[in-house]
Structure formats: C-alpha cells, structure tokens
C-alpha cells in the first residue's frame, strides 16, 4: 500500500503569533497529517511596496493595507523557526516551510530541512530555482498557473543545478482561493506525472475535502491543504482553509482510500472468500429425479448455495444419467 504524504498547510494562518502557530501544529498532529508547513520570507525581499494584493486577499483584508504591509505581519524570524522545529519534533510531525526568497532558502538550508517546497509563484523564477537545485534536497514543486512547457523548464533548471530527478515530486495546483470546481482540472495532475515520470500530487485550494480525496484515487502521492483554527479569523487565507474537524475528516478519508486502492490484482479478498459458498449457486434438482433418469433442463435448475456442482458445468451435466434418486431442491 502506498502511503500518501499529507501536508497540513498552516501557511500564514498563525497571524504572526507563536502561540497560534503551535496550536496549528497540534491540530495537524491530531488530524494525522505527515507534515505541517509554514511560509518563510522577508517581506522586503518578496514584494515591492507598491505591489497589489490578489483579489481574494482584497476580500479578506483591509482595503487600506498594501500587500507589503499585509505579509510583513506574518514574517517568522529565525528564532521562531527554531521554536517551531523543536515543537514539531516534540510532537512527532515533520516541519516544512516554503521559502520565498534567497535569504529564506539559506535559512531553511541552515536548519537542515530535508525537503524544500517550491510554491507556484516561483516556478518561473530561474535564480530561485537554481539556488534550490544546487542544494540537492528533496523537492516538492507546485505548478499552479503554469503550462506544461513552464513545468518542464523548471524541472530542467532544478536538475541542471544539481537536484537528482528522483528527488522531485510535482503537484498540480490552482492558485485561486477558493478554486472553483470547474477550474480544478484534476486530470492534468496525471498528465504532468506521466509527462515527466515523476511522483505527482495535488495542492488543493477548493472548499471542502472531496477534491483531494479524488486526487488520491487518481494516484496522488502527496496532498497539500490549507487549514486554520477558525475560518472567521482575520487574515488572507483563513476563509479558504479547512477547520480542525474538516482536516481530520480529510486525512481519515485519504487513509481509507489508500486502503481501498489495494493492488491491481483481481482476486477474492480475504473478507469475502467466506461468502462464495453463500452467494454463488449450484446445480440442483428442479423436480424429483429417479436413478437412471436423464438430466435435462426440465429437471435441473440453478439455486443457492454454492456448495455443489458449479453452474459453469451445466452443459456437461445435460444428457448425463442420474446415479441415484434426487429430491426437488437437492444438490446434484
């Protein structure tokens, strides 16, 4: 059975509070996620002071606040990273964070993160990709807003810089928060995995949990999903995030799908083998049959249970001679 790597995306839903960040870790642990992911950036390196906010950010934050001012509040300094990494180790969950600039890449590298998550917005950032590629870490690459050619170029840069092909996983994604169902295009996830012969998954921004569950049924080996303590909290991403009970339901559903996918071999399962004798049928006497009488469709029929001669031998029995007397409904 393949284990789906589930990333509970805390992102910036800690609102700059270490207390809230630790509570988010607790929720991810309780839900059964494999990793909890934050975001590492310096606002001054990420956006210009005149950069506009995305439409969904405008709807969930103050109109007077610039994108720079909005994300500045969510910066996690080096000390915060040390605290969160230690807390995740204590709780038994992997700490991940997405770097958004070169200083942040170096910080996470110095903290010995074994996996680097590249966000969709950086897939066309050659210097950034080359920087991460040189580290030869495990890489999870999100591909929102990208076409197949841009995905190929990003992978080539990572590999050309030094990252081994087998260390890359690739995520289909859509960067609209929340993503309309008509724009999910989940089959594209399989396309990118097959095109580049890489493990594939899905970074989900839809409302609800059905799409990531469907992604697992379609072969996703990685699932990433935003979550929050409360969707009514202030901040840009809370409204498009799962609440704790929903995150738990998603993880449990994915674990169930893992079990349900099974192998590709078609054979009776251990649990249903006992049902064969009950649910299948046998050839039985339709009427009373005397010894020496020819067996025919007039005195034979097929009924449960399946403990006698299989109906697949029907043609073989027709025209043969009864070796003894049979009562109606008696197994032949």
Image: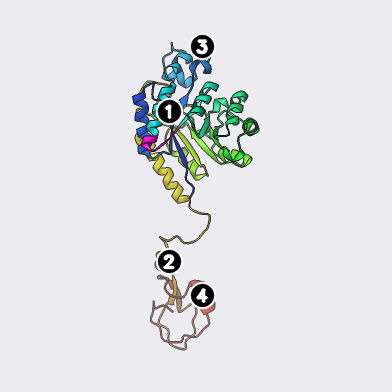
Q: Quadrant of residue 60?
A: top left
The mark nearer the N terminus, 3 or 4, is: 3
Residue drawn 63% across the image and 39% down it: 196
Element assignment for label 4:
helix
Task: Answer whether residue 251 is visible to the viewer in this image.
Answer: yes
Q: Is residue 91 magenta?
A: yes
Range shown magenta: 89-95
Which mark, by number, is residue 276? 2
Residue drawn 45% across the image and 79% down it: 299
Disc 3 marks which residue?
Answer: 49
Which mark, by number, is residue 314? 4
How far apart are labels 1 and 3 at the CA level?
Answer: 25 Å
240 or 37: nearer the viewer: 37
Mark 1 or 3, which is nearer the eye?
Answer: 3
275 or 70: nearer the viewer: 70
Element assignment for label 1:
helix
The mark nearer the N terminus, 2 or 4, is: 2
Element assignment for label 3:
loop
């Amino acid at each position: 059975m393949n284990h789906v790597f589930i990333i509970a995306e805390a992102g910036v839903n800690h609102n700059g509070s270490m207390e809230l960040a630790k509570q988010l870790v607790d929720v991810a642990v309780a839900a059964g996620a494999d990793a909890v992911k934050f975001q590492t950036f310096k606002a001054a390196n990420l956006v210009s002071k005149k950069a506009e906010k995305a439409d969904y950010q405008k709807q969930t934050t103050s109109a007077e606040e610039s994108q720079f001012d909005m994300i500045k509040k969510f910066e996690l300094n080096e000390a915060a990273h040390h605290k969160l990494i230690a807390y995740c180790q204590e709780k038994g969950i992997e700490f991940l964070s997405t770097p958004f600039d070169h200083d942040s890449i170096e910080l996470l590298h110095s903290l010995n993160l074994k996996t680097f998550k590249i966000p969709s917005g950086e897939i066309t950032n050659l210097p950034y990709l080359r920087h991460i590629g040189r580290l030869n870490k495990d890489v999870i690459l999100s591909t929102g807003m990208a076409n197949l050619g841009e995905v190929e170029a990003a992978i080539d840069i990572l590999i050309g810089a030094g990252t081994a092909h087998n260390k890359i996983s690739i995520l289909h994604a859509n960067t609209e928060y929340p993503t309309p169902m008509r724009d999910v295009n989940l089959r594209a996830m399989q396309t990118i995995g097959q095109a580049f012969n890489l493990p594939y998954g899905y970074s989900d921004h839809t409302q609800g949990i059905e799409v990531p569950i469907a992604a697992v049924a379609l072969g996703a080996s990685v699932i990433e999903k935003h979550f929050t303590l409360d969707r009514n909290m202030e901040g840009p991403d809370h409204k498009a995030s799962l609440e704790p009970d929903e995150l738990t339901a998603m993880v449990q559903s994915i674990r169930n799908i893992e079990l349900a996918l099974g192998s590709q071999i078609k054979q009776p399962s251990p649990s249903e083998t006992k049902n064969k004798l009950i649910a299948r049928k046998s050839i039985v006497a339709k009427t009373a049959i005397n010894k020496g009488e020819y067996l025919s469709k007039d005195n034979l029929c097929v009924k449960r249970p399946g403990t006698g001669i299989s109906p697949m031998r029907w043609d073989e029995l027709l025209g043969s001679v009864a070796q003894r007397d049979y009562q109606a409904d008696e197994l032949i």
